[in-house]
């Protein structure tokens, strides 16, 4: 199946033609770990997680790298303010980020390089630029790349010209030869700074050079293997296109003679109250705060529902509306599996785990898009085809909605058809592989937002109600049902026993 991406450099949707047949190497700019992750991080992570899943399910051998920037002015300032080491601060927020990504069912990267662990590689790349006179050193020891030495500067973003108003973002040193020049290395400035020993002297890398060095050391094809491009896809948020990605492309081009990436892919912003989410605007919405109110799956389902390149205007009303789609998936799972007693469902949920990247690889190997198998019928092919078209999520969700409606209609006609039920569950399983939703326990899903203490109280009342019914004390049984309903709990009686759900 042909895959299409919108390439930010060529500003058009292009067919994906990898550097090497059947392989895809992807690098995504990860977080600068000086604070908890916000919804902008969540959206970018989910977008590129979907790209990765699409490639895997199309049978590609994918190597996915997402870096961690753990050396940065903001990290240094915050660590010094708190009286702790920058490593301690960075480790704390790295773990927080990883926890958030796990909750959002984002597949862990194959490699997660850190800037602090790549000082030798960074230094070597800078030395190459110095030796070729593309970079120069200031009297204070800082090292800059001379943009004038790169005739192709601006080719990624079409920005960075003399009249570019965006240059205000990079005017930070009057000693530079050109206001567009950017820092490769920052020499140690004293006790308020941090420095690393290197052949360049005591100091720390600039932001842009970190990514180029980590791509070359952990992901890039060798120059012998690929003369034109280091990797297939470079991704990140739209705000990184200039100057970050432009500068990455420039320094890699000048150091190696080839382009850093064949394709450039960028996701759109998240807006809250009509403003782009950012720390400077003071309206950042942390993922951890959202997870206090909604499960990671509910949040993921909402964030993927708007096309990745469009601006997402965050709204809890829209989030709750999108949740109805998840509800339909889990209602269908419950209908197919039958409502089991609470104890057996607890045992089932303890064994439930999200699909891993290796699971996707194995599934793709066993079931190619050319032969999905009878269980998948046309559904898997159609929804994957939609997502393979630059993540056409609107079409994909339309295909999903049609499947859910048709499945329920078929069950109405043939409620005991075992083959039909197997096909429905196989389709829902494919949804988890592709979109990362629908893989949880169907009973547990409808009990979200209830803590363990509350669950114990609810189940105690349900047990008392069951005993009351057994004793033919129907007045007590009805009173207990009404009491639970008043607490937002509905009790469902089945031949297998009673289960409960939390009412929205």
Image (spheres, grey):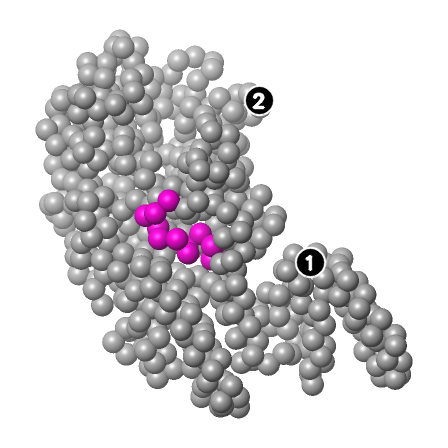
Residue 4's label in the rendered image is none
Q: Which picture quadrant has residue 187?
A: top left
- Tell me the quarter of the image containing the N terminus: bottom left
Mark 2 and mark 1 residues within 8 Å of each other at the beta carbon: no
Q: Is residue 306 magenta?
A: yes
Q: Is residue 167 magenta?
A: no
Tell me if residue 288 comes above or below residue 72 in the rendering.
below
Q: Is residue 250 left or right of residue 71?
A: left
- Residue 2: % across, % down: 20, 64
Tell me if residue 315 comes above or below residue 449 in the rendering.
above
- Residue 351: % across, % down: 57, 69
Q: Residue at point 75% right, 66% down?
A: 485
Q: Is the residue marked by circle 1 packed among few (<14), some (14-19), or many (20+) residues within 10 Å?
A: few
Q: Residue at point 25% right, 10% down?
A: 175
- Residue 153: % across, % down: 16, 30
Query: How much space separates mark 2 and mark 1, taking CA atoms?
Result: 38 Å
Discs 2/1, front: 1
- Tell me the quarter of the image containing the C terminus: bottom right
Q: Residue at point 51% right, 53% down?
A: 319
Q: Which residues are magenta?
A: 297-311
Nearer to me, 131 or 494: 494
Q: Which picture quadrant has residue 446?
A: bottom right
- Residue 10: % across, % down: 16, 44
**Residue marked by disc 2:** 83
Residue 450's label in the rendered image is 1
Nearer to me, 356 or 100: 100
Q: Which element carries disc 1, helix, strand or loop?
A: loop
Tell me if residue 246 comes above or below residue 131 in the rendering.
below
């Amino acid at each position: 199946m042909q895959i299409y991406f919108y390439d930010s450099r060529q500003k058009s949707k292009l067919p994906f033609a990898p550097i090497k047949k059947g392989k895809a190497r992807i690098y995504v700019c990860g977080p600068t770990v000086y604070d908890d992750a916000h919804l902008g991080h969540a959206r970018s992570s989910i977008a590129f997680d979907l790209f990765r899943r699409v490639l895997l399910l199309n049978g590609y051998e994918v190597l996915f790298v997402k870096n961690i920037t753990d050396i940065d002015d903001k990290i240094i300032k915050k660590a010094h303010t708190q009286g702790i080491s920058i490593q301690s601060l960075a480790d704390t927020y790295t773990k927080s980020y990883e926890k958030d990504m796990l909750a959002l069912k984002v597949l862990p990267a194959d490699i997660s390089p850190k800037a602090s662990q790549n000082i030798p590689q960074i230094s070597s790349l800078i030395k190459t630029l110095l030796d070729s006179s593309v970079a120069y050193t200031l009297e204070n020891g800082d090292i800059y790349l001379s943009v004038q030495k790169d005739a192709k500067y601006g080719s990624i973003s079409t920005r960075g010209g003399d009249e570019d108003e965006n240059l205000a973002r990079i005017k930070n040193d009057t000693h530079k030869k050109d206001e567009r020049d950017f820092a490769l290395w920052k020499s140690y400035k004293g006790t308020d700074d941090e420095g690393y020993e290197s052949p360049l002297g005591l100091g720390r890398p600039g932001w842009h050079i970190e990514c180029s060095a980590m791509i070359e050391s952990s992901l890039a094809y060798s120059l012998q293997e690929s003369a034109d491009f280091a990797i297939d896809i470079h991704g990140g948020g739209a705000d990184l296109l200039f100057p970050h990605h432009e500068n990455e492309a420039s320094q890699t081009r000048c150091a190696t003679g080839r382009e850093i990436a064949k394709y450039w892919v960028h996701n759109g912003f998240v807006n809250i109250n009509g403003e782009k989410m950012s720390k400077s605007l003071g309206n950042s919405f942390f993922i951890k705060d959202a997870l206090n109110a909604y499960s990671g799956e509910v949040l993921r389902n909402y964030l993927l529902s708007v096309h990745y390149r469009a601006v997402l205007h965050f709204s809890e009303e829209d989030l709750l509306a999108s949740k109805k789609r998840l509800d339909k998936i889990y209602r269908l799972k419950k209908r197919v599996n039958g409502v089991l007693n609470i104890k057996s469902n607890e045992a089932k949920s303890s064994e439930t785990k999200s699909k891993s990247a290796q699971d996707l690889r194995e599934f793709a190997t066993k079931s190619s898009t050319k032969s999905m198998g009878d269980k998948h019928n046309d559904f898997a092919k159609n929804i994957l085809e939609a997502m393979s078209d630059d993540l056409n999520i609107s079409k994909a969700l339309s295909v999903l909605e049609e499947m859910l409606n048709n499945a329920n209609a078929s069950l109405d006609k043939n409620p005991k058809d075992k083959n039909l039920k197997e096909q429905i569950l196989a389709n829902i399983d494919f949804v988890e592989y592709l979109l990362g939703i629908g893989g949880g326990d169907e009973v547990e899903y409808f009990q979200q937002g209830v803590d363990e203490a509350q669950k114990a109280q609810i189940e105690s009342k349900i047990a008392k109600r069951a005993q009351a019914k057994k004793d033919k004390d129907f007045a007590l049984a009805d009173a207990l049902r009404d009491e639970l309903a008043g607490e937002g709990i509905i009790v469902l009686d089945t031949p297998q026993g009673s289960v409960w759900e939390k009412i929205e």
